[in-house]
Amino acid sequence: LQCYFSTYIRYRSKNKSVGKVKRTILSLVHHCSTGMASTVQFLHDWLSPCHRNMRNLNGPSVSCPELPVAGASVCSGSLCSPGSYGAAGSNRSADAVCSPCPAGSFSTATGATSASACSVCQPGTYQPGSGTSAAVLCYPCTAGTYWTGSGATTSGACSRCQPGSYQTGSGDSACSGTPCSPGSTGMTGAKRALDAVCSSCLAGSFSSVTGASACTLCGRGFYFNQTGGVTCSPCASGSFSVDQGASSCSGSPCSAGSYGAAGANRSADAICSVCPAGSFSTTTGASVCSGSLCSTGSYGAAGATRSSDALCSLCPPGSFSNATGATACKLCVAGTYYGTAVISNLDESFHLNDQQQLWTRPAGLVKKLDYNNFENMSAIIAPAGASSVTLQFATFRTELNYDFLSVRSCTAVDCAQTSLLGRYSGPTVPGPLTSSTGVMLIQWTSDDLTTESGWSASWSSVVLGGASSCSGSPCSAGSYGAAGATRSSDALCSLCPPGSISTVTAAGGCTL
């Protein structure tokens, strides 16, 4: 590239066209190209000031004083070569600097004026050096590798083809084939389809990701007994595996009715325990038991293998249970007792529906408010261990002589045999009703006409036994009494006879 110029016109100082000539000169001035600078001025000082980056091709023999700022007839230096760039219009050599294109890019142009003239290396290639002048100088990723991005600066940007895929050529942005699926593995960086083979993980190992290059051994306490595993299973409760890569576990799984911790890695941890009273397990190797433990005040059999065997019974009068899951009740110690209890402080609500209900809670609320036509519903109230059940109404309003509530006493929980306690209809609130058998049946019907606001009631029960603690105070040292009292009059303490002693509280007798 050559520098632009302005034409100099000779004239006398008295010539009236001076201003016009100066304007012509200035209008023809252009900047030097990038990488070149002007440092010499040439015009006579009566045509001053000389302007930066100007030159005269046909000027007079007399030049302006030589200064590094204006009036050059040529630009010094060399244009930026391919692979570099610099700023245009420099007026001193220190500014006429060319910068190399950064690593990962190249430029084929001479005299490039900005970094945007540098193009990045294409996907599948890289360039670690700077100042590259052609795209062919971007190195290709080798066979068996690829790179999806652009502008890579190192060969490390090239990734090896995943197991199951391959690349036969160089400089590619993707690999052919399908990566190995979870449960299998293969070699990375395959250069041909023949090498892109996937193999299933052996028993005792697994791979959980796509494109795995190796299978992972099952950890201690885990196993997998087939090929192609994507995860390992913990050893069932009662069994264990000591080493990695196990395809089976040692020991025997916990039997039905028992449970233990899964994933044991030594025999000392492979312990089985029977399901506590109220719970059960139906399968071998269970890590937890189903159901709910017997509550305090009750007991049941441990080790149940089905729900029908996981039954809880109330502690009989004169005994108690202060722990959940108890298999037996303890007698009230000498000086204490427990007989019956009236339970009426529960606020759990129950609702009638088209299916007959069985409610075994010792107390609760039942409501049939804003009822509908054509209702025919019933429920059995049978609190566990109750000697009697009492129903107390809070509200009552039904269509008189058309909508009825009947309450019956049952001889057994199935209510096959009943006796009527009362049948009610209209606006009058019934009085309390008690079933002395501990089982009560309520039946509700409505017709097809008028409906009213309905009714609500609560029930309470007298429960025999079911104590979590006993009343009274244990007999003190020096006295004795009988254990298992069911009433306070039986919870008597007597002093030890002369010549005998008792050194503990709640003693059942004295010793000589």
Image: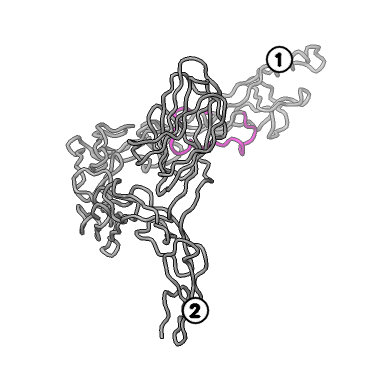
Q: Nearer the viewer, mark 2 or mark 1?
A: 2
Magenta residues, dominant SS class: loop
The answer to if 93 sits in the magenta stretch is yes
Residue 14 highlighted magenta (yes or no):
no
Q: Residue at x 78, y 12 (%)?
A: 17
Nearer-the-camera pick, 221 or 325: 325
* Residue 296, x across and y down, in percent: 43, 56
Task: Report whether 50 appears left or right of 456.
Answer: right
Give the amino acid type for the residue marked by disc 1 in the picture. Thr
Label 2 to label 1: alpha-carbon separation: 140 Å
Which colour scheme appears in the figure?
one colour
- Label located before the other in sequence (2 or 1): 1
For the view shown, which residue lies furthest in the left direction?
194
Residue denoted by label 1 = 24
- The quadrant holding residue 238 is bottom left
Q: Which residues are magenta?
A: 89-112
Q: Is residue 217 something one can see in this rendering?
A: no
Is residue 51 shown left or right of residue 127?
right
**Three-letter residue code for mark 2:** Leu
Q: Which residue is mark 2?
A: 495
Q: Residues within 10 Å of mark 1 (few under 14, many from 20)?
A: some
Closer-to-camera residue (302/269): 302
